[in-house]
């Protein structure tokens, strides 16, 4: 025997390992038993084995198991079955008696809670509410992420621009960030006289986190909402992308330079002359809207957990609109440019994560209409750092700081009476420069004692040199999942925002303004089974120290306000016609101090009911059509009751009625779009798209225009009459 | 056979002596070590795949689950559990897509654990394939394909001359339309590169060693897609030279070539 062992060592070591008891003179023994539920039902297919030897068997349909083991002495019997809690039992071998095992059902394994009150995600990141393809395919959104966000609940339909008016708040109350840096001018053509568009296209963005309220302490200087955008970094392949449409041309080159670096650049030129002629609107413009865009990004992963990214953007816009006001008929001209450079990065050191960004963002805008001339230049230079650390299971800490350096230059002449814009009208001439800075710091703790419950408690403090005061913002949010797919959410917090720097200008503003403040209280319930999503949220928001401008561009502070309402959001497949879609309904009742009268009045952004329904259907693998219907209560406006003639200037001065006491007619619009994908050669993807906005050519009203003595008024049609838009993009590898 | 020639080396002799001295009343057995179990899994999964033995593959999954419980800190054991589950999911996809998807989720978590503990190129490449197979809708396509791409890049970075990484890259290209960066031409390049790399591939047990015959099967399919039947036949025959019992090639792919 020993000679044989020595003669065939490898074989014997193997046999020793697997059936050692035989060699040691030990008889093998049979392990048998049954596996059942507490109620007695048999559990088939359970994996029953000895931890020490891995010997074992699967239970049969009667829950019976039986296997031979060479082991002796105390051993650990392990029983596993998907959907049940693992059982471990120490048994003594050899053993004659069967081993009865009872398995308890495991709690349904759920992902940690990700739903937060008021929050939605867009883009190509995991857990998005809206993918970037959804953004592109939202009919009527013109591939503008901000317009796609407008189809979410909590946003009021105010005009036809891309502005985000959230739960009764002004457009300036939504903070837009890119790669951790605040974008000082997120909308292009954002003047009183033009329809604004977002600065970014969906293919520049990897994802967007949008919060309609109750957001965390890492976001400061925002009163109502946050749109946190992440730019696309390193492309996954090198390619050229060319596009052409009735409104312009564009080109994009993406370079997948190496395993750890890459980048892209885009250039586009938009000239809407043909688009306006095609849709019969050329006569409305002296200068049709035109723009030039240059943007680029580069990303470098310097190690597995470390990454740096730079994003740069330069845009110019120009427009000349023919305006017929009682006080002046002429061309309103706007000439604007904007730039943004954001460098950001993150790294992970064990349980510690660090994210940082340094950015500068600027805009310059010149407006001209009769006696009104305004040149404004803004710049925001900022740096930000955030540290996250997981200190144990279910406990995470985060903290950070930010610094902003802000400047605003304003020069021009503003008519002393808003009704008299004609050249030669009395004006106030001014030139001003406001500079200041803001420091902010924040810290929060996230507690998730188990997967179904999550608390976040935090606070931030900010000090602005404009207000010369420190503000403190405590915030709390809680999410609880009482059952699979069902989540209850709640949030409460204090939010501050420094008014526009030029509101502190001594001539037209008030140097003693305080930071504006809002208290949010939100409660919601969400059901999401992966295929169908329903979210309902109710909220209440109280404002204080609000600052806003009068019709004469004078800044007034000390305003108050309140907004309350609820939102409903549905998303999923429609059980007929193969449709997929989403619907959002928002109800709001809001009021705030009217800066002209000083009275509490309905908020000018109070569209009581807003409904957005978006439906799409894939007709083939490559062809998709979609439709969107938007409807909203008309927004409030202040009516003109009569007018007083001013003999000196020969113009009529309007006398206004109760602030925001009337509403524009209700708004509705139906849009259609279709996209067709085709591959003409290897590695080619060509997309043809066509969109019809306001299909039924409904005459929505954007405002009332008065005659010269204000005795009559006619509705001014909103810019989007029936408009056809089409184009194509194609990819070329290189 | 002579005594001298087969004399046991010193560690082996010591192991035998030690085992012979183990008391018989308690712990009279030698617990398998993770390396041995990984080696059994490597051999067992390969044999089941070649033989088209679904039951054999299921047995390997069962063994791998036990091993992952017993040796929870061993990366290779988790790798083989992920690999076996990937194979099971691939076989189940046509008949039971939901079940296959659930299996892929388990494979993903096993591979994730494996990468955390002991990253090897094959784990990253398999993770890429597992993520790719999870794409079932537009909503998840972009995020999953980005993650899959990142895993494959990491695999190539770690094992630029690893033939199994090249095979999985080729399979991915084979199933990806050319407009999305795949296509049969690219797949062919990758399978040919993999076949060449296998000539110098000598992984030590229990590291993964599968793929030498499989790459020929995929080469054959790619040639079929490119309408090159003679080259396809040669590739299938080469696969059977390497593994005469390769059921998939012998019973399905090769007969399908016949006019």
Image (tube, coloured by chain):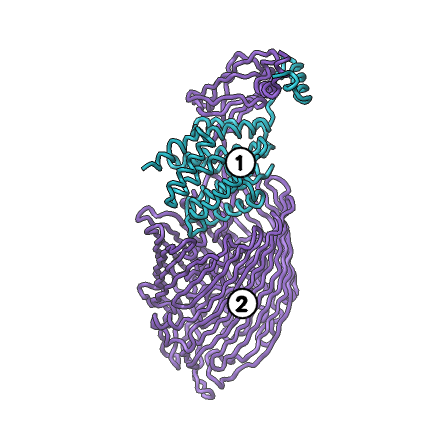
Kindly identify which residue carries mark 2.
A314
For label 2, the SS is: strand
Classify the position of the N terminus of chain A by image quarter: top right
Kindly identify which residue carries mark 1.
B110
Chain appearing in cyan on the rendered image: B
Task: Please name the residue shown 63% across and 51% down the image.
Answer: A354
Residue B119 picture location, percent across and down: 59, 39
Between B124 and A210, the residue placed more toward the observer is: B124
Number of marks drawn? 2
Residue B178 seen in render? yes
Is A185 placed above or below A622 here? below
Left or right side of B254 for A68: right
Left or right side of B210 for A643: left
Chain A: give its colour: purple
Is A293 placed above or below A150 here? below
Is B25 placed above or below A397 here? above
> Are the residues under badges 2 and 1 in a single subunit?
no
Q: Would you identify the image quadrant in which residue B224 lies?
A: top left
């Amino acid at each position: 025997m020993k000679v044989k062992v020595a003669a065939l060592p490898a074989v014997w070591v193997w046999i020793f390992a697997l059936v050692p008891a035989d060699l040691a003179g030990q008889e093998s023994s049979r392990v048998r038993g049954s596996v059942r539920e507490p109620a007695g039902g048999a559990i088939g297919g359970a994996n029953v084995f000895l931890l020490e030897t891995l010997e074992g068997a699967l239970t049969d349909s009667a829950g019976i198991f039986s296997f031979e083991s060479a082991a002796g002495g105390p051993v650990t019997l392990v029983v596993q079955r998907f959907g049940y809690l693992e059982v471990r039992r120490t048994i003594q071998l050899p053993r004659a008696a069967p081993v009865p095992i009872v398995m308890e059902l495991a709690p349904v394994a759920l992902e940690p809670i990700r739903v937060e009150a008021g929050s939605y995600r867009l883009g190509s990141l995991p857990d998005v509410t809206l993918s970037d393809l959804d953004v592109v395919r939202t009919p009527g959104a013109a591939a503008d992420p901000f317009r796609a966000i407008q189809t979410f609940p909590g946003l009021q339909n105010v005009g036809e621009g891309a502005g985000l008016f959230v739960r009764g708040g002004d457009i300036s109350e939504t903070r837009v960030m890119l790669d951790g840096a605040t974008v000082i001018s997120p909308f292009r053509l954002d003047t009183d006289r033009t329809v604004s568009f977002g600065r970014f296209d969906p293919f520049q963005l990897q994802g967007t986190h949008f919060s309609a309220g109750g957001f965390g302490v890492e976001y400061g200087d925002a009163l109502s909402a946050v749109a946190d955008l992440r730019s696309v970094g390193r492309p996954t392949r090198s390619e050229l992308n060319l596009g052409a449409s009735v409104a312009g041309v564009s080109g994009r080159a993406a370079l997948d330079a190496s395993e750890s670096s890459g980048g892209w650049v885009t250039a586009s030129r938009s000239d809407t002359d043909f688009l306006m002629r095609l849709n019969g609107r050329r006569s409305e413009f002296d200068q049709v809207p035109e723009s030039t865009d240059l943007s680029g990004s580069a990303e470098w992963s310097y190690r597995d957990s470390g990454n740096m990214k730079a994003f740069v953007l330069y845009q110019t816009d120009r427009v000349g609109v023919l305006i017929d006001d009682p006080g002046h008929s002429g061309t309103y001209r706007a000439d604007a440019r904007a730039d943004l450079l954001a460098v950001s990065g993150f790294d992970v050191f064990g349980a510690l994560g660090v994210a940082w960004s340094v950015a500068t963002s600027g805009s310059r805008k010149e407006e001209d209409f009769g006696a009104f001339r305004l040149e404004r230049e803004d710049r925001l230079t900022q740096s930000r750092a955030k540290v996250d650390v997981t200190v144990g299971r279910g406990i995470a800490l985060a903290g950070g700081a930010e610094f902003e350096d802000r400047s605003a230059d304003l020069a021009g002449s503003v008519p002393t009476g808003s009704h008299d814009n004609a050249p030669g009208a009395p004006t106030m001439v001014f030139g001003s420069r406001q500079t200041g800075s803001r420091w902010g710091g924040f810290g929060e703790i996230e507690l998730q004692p188990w997967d179904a419950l999550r608390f976040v408690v935090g606070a931030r403090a900010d000090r602005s040199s404009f207000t010369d005061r420190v503000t403190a913002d405590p915030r709390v949010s809680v999410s609880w999942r009482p059952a699979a797919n069902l989540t209850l959410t709640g949030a409460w917090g204090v939010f501050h925002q420094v008014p526009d720097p030029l509101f502190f200008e001594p001539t037209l503003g008030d140097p003693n303004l305080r930071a504006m403040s809002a208290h949010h209280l939100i409660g919601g319930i969400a059901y999401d089974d992966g295929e169908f999503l329903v979210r309902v949220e109710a909220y209440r928001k109280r404002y204080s120290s609000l600052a806003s401008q009068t019709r004469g561009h004078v800044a007034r502070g000390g305003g108050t306000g309140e907004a309350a309402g609820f939102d409903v959001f549905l998303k999923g497949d429609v059980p007929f016609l193969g449709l997929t879609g989403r619907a959002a309904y928002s109800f709001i009742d809001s009021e705030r101090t009217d800066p002209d009268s000083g009275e509490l009045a309905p908020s000018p952004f109070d569209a009581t009911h807003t409904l957005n329904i978006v439906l799409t259907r894939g007709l083939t693998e490559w062809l998709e059509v979609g439709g969107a219907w938007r409807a909203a209560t008309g927004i409030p406006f202040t009516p003109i009751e009569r007018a007083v003639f001013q003999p000196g200037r020969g113009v009529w001065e309007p006398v206004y009625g109760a602030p925001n006491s009337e509403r524009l007619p209700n708004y509705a619009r139906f849009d259609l779009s279709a996209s067709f994908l085709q591959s003409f050669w290897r590695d080619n993807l060509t997309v043809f798209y066509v969109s019809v906005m306001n299909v039924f050519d409904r005459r929505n009203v954007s405002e009332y225009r008065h005659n010269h003595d204000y005795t009559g008024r006619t509705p001014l049609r909103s810019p989007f009459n029936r408009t056809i838009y089409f184009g194509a993009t194609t990819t070329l590898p290189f | 056979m002579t005594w001298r020639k087969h004399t046991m080396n010193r560690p082996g002799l010591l192991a035998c002596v030690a085992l012979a001295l183990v008391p018989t009343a308690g712990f009279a057995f030698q617990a398998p070590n993770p390396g041995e179990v990984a080696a059994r899994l490597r051999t067992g999964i390969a044999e089941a795949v070649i033989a088209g033995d679904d039951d054999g593959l299921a047995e390997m999954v069962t063994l791998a689950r036990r091993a992952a419980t017993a040796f929870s800190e061993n990366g290779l054991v988790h790798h083989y559990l992920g690999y076996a589950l990937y194979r099971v999911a691939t076989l189940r996809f046509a008949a039971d897509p939901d079940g296959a998807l659930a299996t892929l989720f388990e494979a993903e978590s096993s591979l994730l654990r494996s990468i955390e503990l002991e990253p090897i190129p094959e784990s990253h490449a398999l993770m890429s394939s597992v993520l790719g197979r999870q794409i079932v809708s537009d909503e998840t396509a972009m995020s999953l394909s980005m993650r899959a791409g990142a895993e494959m890049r990491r695999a190539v970075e770690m094992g630029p001359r690893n033939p199994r990484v090249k095979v999985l890259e080729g399979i991915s290209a084979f199933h990806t339309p050319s407009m999305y960066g795949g296509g049969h031409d690219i797949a062919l390049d990758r399978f040919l590169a993999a076949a060449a790399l296998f000539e110098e591939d000598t992984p030590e047990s229990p590291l993964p060693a599968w793929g030498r015959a499989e790459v020929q099967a995929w080469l054959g399919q790619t040639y079929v897609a490119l309408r090159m039947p003679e080259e396809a036949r040669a590739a299938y025959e080469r696969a059977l030279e390497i593994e005469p019992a390769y059921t998939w090639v012998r019973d399905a792919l090769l007969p399908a070539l016949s006019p």
